[in-house]
Image: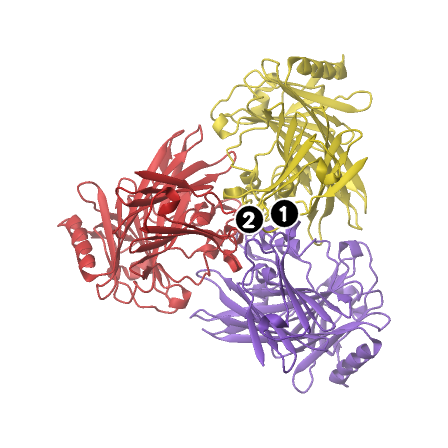
Chain colours: A yellow, B purple, C red
Amino acid sequence: MVHTLDLVALEAGEDERILTPEHVGGSGNDWKVTMRRLRGGLSEGVVTLDVTHGDLRYVVIPTRGFGLWKAWHRGEEFGWQSPVRGPVHPQFVNLGEPSGLGWLDGFDELLVRCGWESNGAPEYDAASGRLVYPLHGRIANKPAHAASLTYDDTTGQLSLTGIVEETRFHFTKLRMRSTIATTKGARRLVIADEIENFSASPTAVQMLYHVNFGRPLLDGGSQLVAPVERLVPRNAHAAANVASWPTYAPPVPGFAEEVYFMSLYGNAAGQSHVLLKNAAGTHGVSLLFPLQQLPCFTQWKNTTAVADGYVTGLEPGTNFPNPRSFEAEHGRVVPLGPGERAPFTLTLELHTQSAEVQAAEQQVLEIQADRPTQCFDQPQPTWCS
Amino acid sequence: MVHTLDLVALEAGEDERILTPEHVGGSGNDWKVTMRRLRGGLSEGVVTLDVTHGDLRYVVIPTRGFGLWKAWHRGEEFGWQSPVRGPVHPQFVNLGEPSGLGWLDGFDELLVRCGWESNGAPEYDAASGRLVYPLHGRIANKPAHAASLTYDDTTGQLSLTGIVEETRFHFTKLRMRSTIATTKGARRLVIADEIENFSASPTAVQMLYHVNFGRPLLDGGSQLVAPVERLVPRNAHAAANVASWPTYAPPVPGFAEEVYFMSLYGNAAGQSHVLLKNAAGTHGVSLLFPLQQLPCFTQWKNTTAVADGYVTGLEPGTNFPNPRSFEAEHGRVVPLGPGERAPFTLTLELHTQSAEVQAAEQQVLEIQADRPTQCFDQPQPTWCS
Amino acid sequence: MVHTLDLVALEAGEDERILTPEHVGGSGNDWKVTMRRLRGGLSEGVVTLDVTHGDLRYVVIPTRGFGLWKAWHRGEEFGWQSPVRGPVHPQFVNLGEPSGLGWLDGFDELLVRCGWESNGAPEYDAASGRLVYPLHGRIANKPAHAASLTYDDTTGQLSLTGIVEETRFHFTKLRMRSTIATTKGARRLVIADEIENFSASPTAVQMLYHVNFGRPLLDGGSQLVAPVERLVPRNAHAAANVASWPTYAPPVPGFAEEVYFMSLYGNAAGQSHVLLKNAAGTHGVSLLFPLQQLPCFTQWKNTTAVADGYVTGLEPGTNFPNPRSFEAEHGRVVPLGPGERAPFTLTLELHTQSAEVQAAEQQVLEIQADRPTQCFDQPQPTWCS
């Protein structure tokens, strides 16, 4: 039987609300959801949903675009340590700063969506120099206006749903319905998003999942295992180290980020799979996603000192995070007619045992099979702005 | 006898406060005011005053410059459906965005004041390209710091008063005292604002009432009845359809807005009157205002699809909403010496019966009488930037 | 015995918390600290710490960078009347506004720190015209994420500690630990700040204490007594009145601010001392600080009308508040290696009796002794941008 509960906004006098199967007319303690309003510093007013479901725990941030802050499996943390003390309330993030870099003030999540009007590097008007599209778009700093919880006591599936809009009168009218689902006993988070153009006029969107891992998973010798068709370094700096793209360095103070753009292979169903594993091969994380929805994959290596945010971003997207106009020129936007919807599905699988890592790696290798990888040693004009 | 009650800010633990005649030492149930703190999404933290007085209901938003969100007469709604999900808290509106268009993120009110340092289109510094004046000014996103309620049990008049400031050290020092009054049995909202320059140095201000109507009032065949002296299309696009300025189209997806600037005639007392009525002539709304205070009238036709905000703006102002410098050049700013105050009065009358619409139309026609309308078929250099 | 109490953030349902010696396991009523969440207008959500300790009272604003709002000695107020109705919550201050002047919307404190990436005038990119560094930096609008109270019942010293960060991923990683201490019976506030670069890469910071006084202390004939080594007017306008730099005018509507840059002499321990006293010599305030930490002193004379903010700023800093690049060119930034900390100490002494003023003046004169003052009558190229 399926039970649904509206997660009505916290009220005055309420900083915490605990929900268990009882609250949806069930019983037992298979899961617990704590809705919490954070207090103090840059987190003042942020609402989080802290979910425990079997051996999985994860924290969703409705206030920050229904992103995913951190996850744990059997008590082991997945995420990263940003120098930013978050989660940061959007009131403290100035996306309109002329540099277009204000987004960086709020960046500390495991999974942050970038989009939807644009999702890449800041873009400025050529004539006036004025900012047109801020870094990574607006959606990570838009609060969900509705959320609900659904529990199916037959399948043991628990899911959280949130609705977030990116709307500007005369311009964008986009709405996302996002569902994050887990099943009892599993170690997967299945994220199913659907973006609707609720305008009566056509538009075009971009979506990128900026999925980030640092300590303890990421270490010197960590590897990205991916079924790569083509790989292109974003710029000359990344080109210099292209040969070592699959391998991560230990923390190096002052390390300058390296970015690689890729197209991946998928399985017969069109699903791709990338694996990040630690040096010892005892821990890892898999990202699974359909290439039809998310055809572009970006690897961001930022193996700077831990204090500065030792992290890698694994970024399946509709495009590469170049400026919006460049991507549109090369057809990497998703047209959405009036009322049309674009679905995006992304699965995260957390591995905390060698056998799990090995099984995941085997799956990636099977996708690659004997298909070739074309690895460019220089930026390519149609992929790199 | 006149009773006054300070509407002290809602406290921790208090999301709603209901006020009735009892709270001012009276009795009966002639009116009810609900003070409410909204929760969730972009509305988080917005405080509203929801007033019922006889057959009238209206919602004031102290958090958004003491604007008017919506109104109802005998249960019929006046206002519009913006694609923006509001009312939007100013923390989510970035007026400083380099484009100057951040204001659009919060735009969903029936009546929103524009001003006071500037009230028109964004203006950029010619040399640097930097934003100088953002679209429609700052005041719609300044919260009132004080509010009160006054009830006169002899006349049956209920009024709400709010105080809003637009202040920047070294620059603007302006304070508005706004009173919105209704009388038992009437279907009028009388808005009496007074802007004070509380600086010891002179300044100049602009004020524009952006009064907006969509469904259900606005429909294909709706008409604006106005005692027009001169009418000028804002640009070539509006010029192409100037002949049909009084008539509204049904919702048309992708419709590009048309704007007409007008000077109006007034009655012997200098009061003008414009009427918006639906196609059937069964419903309408009148705006009454003194031409000495608000000599410029702007009609904004935005008959796009309902999903995108099918709406017309009726905009009495001290000027036309061109960039600030252009308006100053043409003398359309209000100089305010040290301590000087400028009063503005605007009355909204809600018509929900044909006879009321007809009576209002008759009043407009009497103002026009046999005076001529000069209708330009092209933008004019002193009116159009 | 030393007692410490964490000042955990106010929760839902809690707008006020009163702390006395009892709360740290002591007794008596030597002090009282009221933690308060402000409501209404631009102050909505601001948390203040209102401290009474013997004859001293002062209000700290954790929400605004742990600045100091106002202080009182024996009931007499020190601070100023800004036209800005504060304290203003950072959500209403747009530091990213293209002009770089958004900071002015929140400016009403007795002591506001400027820094740390930059602390001076706005700076724009020469090529694009885009804002690079906003006026006076970001820290006054960063909320403290932690605060505590310490009471030593042996010495009678009460201190408040707050932690504030200025962090941007890929850029700044700075953390301040600030302690404001008072001792029973004294009329001194001792502010001890320490800024840490918690990055693994080197950086450079700027700090300026913008300490502001108006009515009732400041009046026509007030004087700044300072042990000046060199004095330079910031611009031609200030140069025109350089001869009268030590003396303040009464409020003059429309007065254009005058700024003087100075290097000061110190005592044998390297401590300098400046005194602001009223015309009658009955009231004053002293600022004491080590020249090694704060070698540059700026006097800001803004003797405009009281309504517009009649005020003087006494500003010990690591540099002069010119644009960041100019100051860096002239070596006026503080390099901070990975993990390095820079301490800053500033003491305010409040004088409410002639004898106290005279004693302070004597101390300043002793520092000057017979050392010469070099007073330039024109801006100098290495000091003035």
- Look at the image and tell me whether residue A218 can be seen: yes
The residue positioned farthest toward the right in the image shown? B280
Q: Chain of mark 2?
A: C
- Quadrant for the C terminus of chain B, please: bottom right
Q: Which residue is mark 1?
A: A10
Tell me if C243 is positioned left or right of A285 in this view.
left
Q: Say if labels 2 and 1 share a chain.
A: no
Label 2: state its secondary structure.
Answer: loop
- In this view, C17 is above or below C312: above
Instruction: Tell me what residue is drawn at x 84 percent, y 62 percent.
Output: B250
Q: Is residue A383 above or below residue B266?
A: above
The amino acid sitting under disc 1 is: Leu
Q: Nearer the viewer, residue B58 or B42?
A: B58
Q: Circle 1 marks a residue in which chain?
A: A
**Residue closest to the far bottom:** B268
**What kind of residue is marked 2?**
Ala
* Residue A191 picture location, percent across and down: 72, 32
Q: Secondary structure at mark 1?
A: loop
Q: Foreground: B30 or A327? A: B30
- In percent of width and height, residue B234 lies at 70, 65
10 Å crowding of disc 1: few (<14), some (14-19), many (20+): some
Q: Which mark is residue C12?
A: 2
**How many residues crowd mark 2 within 10 Å: few (<14), some (14–19), many (20+)?**
many
Residue C331 shows up from this direction: no
The residues bearing labels 2 and 1 have C-alpha atoms spaced at a distance of: 10 Å
Q: Is residue A105 left or right of residue C223?
A: right
Q: Going 37% across and 46% down the picture, which residue do you hit?
A: C22
CB within 8 Å, label 2 to label 1: yes
Examine the rendered structure and indicate whether residue C102 appears above or below residue C205. Answer: below
Residue A82: mark in rendering: none
Location of the N terminus of chain B by quadrant is bottom right
